Image: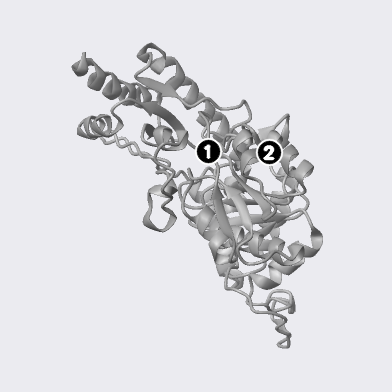
């Protein structure tokens, strides 16, 4: 019997290879060509104003914080309210730009609590970083309203939210910048890449220079037609090597065709889990998602979490944890965090296997391994 893994990405291999083959045939695998096509396709799919394809969501978050800070005249040490339940790149991006992450509490949705945000706003607060955990848009509109009322920028870390919607509209319209991840196990997997979507056209333009080492024209733009090359360009600022490639964009173009279909199947898997876990009572409590969630993750709060995961592993089932409270890491350690509601929730979190290759029988097997653990405890 095969092990059931937490994540296994699925690709439409023949279609993907055909997209990649075009890059190889014309000899253009880097910035431009497919990256331009993917950006246009993403704008059409999401309805967002702009989309800039970069090599990771981490790069996009760094650009978001840095450029908003420059535009707003933020000073070193100014504060961005953020969540402690996230992959560390979310909060690293704040530090990259010289600002201070201020950790709010989460609630049972695993998203940042609007009430906690309100309590933390000071005269040094400049923005809120909202993470849609597992693809869940819960609280996003409330946080957007707080930002509008308090003149704060809203940065949406939508790493899990490709295809997530609120009221029929793709998430991101609410934010000053929205950053998506297309890393290898995300809902739209490429290998590693992302999309930075700035609401402000000037910031979108600047992000394109900043992600290509500060150069004002990329190589594809300087090639009017393939085979006709213009060598001259200017370097306007210090930038980074954050650009995406046509190979990754080619993979993304195919995955985008199936994103809504794939997310619908993820919601089906979540519904199976909901049904089968219902008899568990208080031992295992699923995290509830709003209807428009992309369902990147299926997370539960579980009693005796660590022992449960050992038992599941013995049954050939491999769950994960998303995420450890960042304040438990040495560099983000905060002395007052141990008693927070976030810490207590974090210590019970389990992410159950969630990917397109799961069948109903696989979900049954995952849930059976959970039942087996608690049956021994009774």
- Residue 199 versus residue 225: which sits nearer the camera? 199
* Rendered image coloring scheme: one colour
- Is there CB contact under 8 Å for labels 1 and 2? no
Quarter of the picture containing the C terminus is top left
Marks 1/2: CA–CA distance: 13 Å
- Residue 336 versus residue 227: which sits nearer the camera? 336
What crowding class fits label 2: few (fewer than 14 Cα within 10 Å), some (14-19), or many (20 or more)?
Answer: many
Q: Is residue 109 above or below residue 206?
A: above
Task: Give the percent coordinates (x, y) of residue 31.
Answer: 63, 69
Q: Tag 1, which secondary structure?
A: loop
State which quadrant residue 138 falls in: top right
- Residue 259 versus residue 235: which sits nearer the camera? 235
Residue at the location (65% across, 59% down)? Answer: 64
State which quadrant residue 196 falls in: bottom right
Quarter of the picture containing the N terminus is top left
Q: Is residue 44 above or below residue 31?
A: above
In the displayed image of the protein, which residue is found farthest to the right?
Answer: 201
Mark linked to residue 105: 1
What crowding class fits label 1: few (fewer than 14 Cα within 10 Å), some (14-19), or many (20 or more)?
Answer: many
Q: What residue does disc 2 label?
A: 143
Residue 115 in sight in this render: yes
Task: Give the percent coordinates (x, y) of residue 359.
Answer: 40, 27
Task: Give the percent coordinates (x, y) of residue 112.
Answer: 57, 38
Mark linked to residue 3: none
Q: Tag 2, which secondary structure?
A: helix
Q: Is residue 99 above or below residue 110?
A: below
Residue at the location (34% across, 19% down)? Answer: 283
Q: Please indicate whether residue 327 sits to the left or right of residue 182 in the image.
A: left
């Amino acid at each position: 019997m095969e092990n059931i893994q937490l994540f296994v990405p699925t690709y439409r291999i023949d279609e993907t290879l055909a997209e990649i083959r075009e890059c190889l045939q014309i000899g253009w695998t880097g910035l431009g060509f497919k990256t331009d096509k993917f950006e246009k396709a993403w704008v059409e799919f999401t309805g967002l104003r702009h989309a800039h394809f970069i090599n990771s969501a981490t790069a996009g978050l760094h650009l978001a914080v840095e450029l908003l800070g420059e535009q707003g005249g933020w000073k070193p040490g100014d504060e961005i309210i953020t969540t402690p339940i996230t992959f560390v790149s979310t909060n690293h991006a704040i530090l990259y730009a010289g600002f201070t992450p201020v950790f709010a509490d989460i609630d049972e949705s695993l998203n940042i609590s609007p009430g906690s945000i309100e309590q933390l706003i000071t005269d040094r607060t400049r923005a809120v970083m909202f993470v849609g955990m597992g693809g869940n848009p819960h609280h996003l509109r409330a946080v957007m309203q707080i930002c509008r009322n308090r003149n704060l920028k809203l940065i949406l870390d939508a790493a899990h939210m490709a295809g997530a919607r609120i009221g029929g509209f793709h998430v991101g319209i609410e934010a000053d910048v929205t950053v998506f991840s297309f890393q290898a196990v995300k809902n739209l997997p490429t290998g590693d890449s992302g999309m930075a979507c700035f609401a402000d056209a000037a910031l979108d333009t600047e992000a394109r220079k900043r992600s290509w080492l500060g150069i004002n024209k990329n190589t594809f733009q300087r090639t009017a037609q393939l085979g006709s090359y213009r060598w001259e360009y200017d370097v306007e600022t210090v930038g980074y090597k954050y650009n995406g490639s046509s190979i990754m964009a080619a993979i993304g173009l195919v995955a985008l065709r199936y994103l809504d279909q794939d997310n619908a199947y993820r919601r089906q898997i979540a519904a199976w889990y909901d049904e089968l876990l219902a008899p568990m009572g208080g031992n295992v409590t699923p995290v509830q998602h709003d209807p428009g969630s992309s369902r990147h993750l299926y997370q539960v709060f579980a009693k005796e979490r660590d022992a449960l995961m050992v038992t599941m592993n013995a049954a050939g089932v491999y769950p994960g944890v998303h995420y450890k409270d960042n304040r438990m890491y040495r560099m983000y350690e905060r002395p007052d965090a141990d008693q927070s509601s976030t810490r207590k929730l974090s210590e019970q979190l389990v992410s159950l296997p969630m990917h397109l290759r799961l069948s109903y029988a696989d979900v049954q097997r995952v849930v059976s391994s959970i039942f087996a653990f608690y049956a021994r405890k009774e």
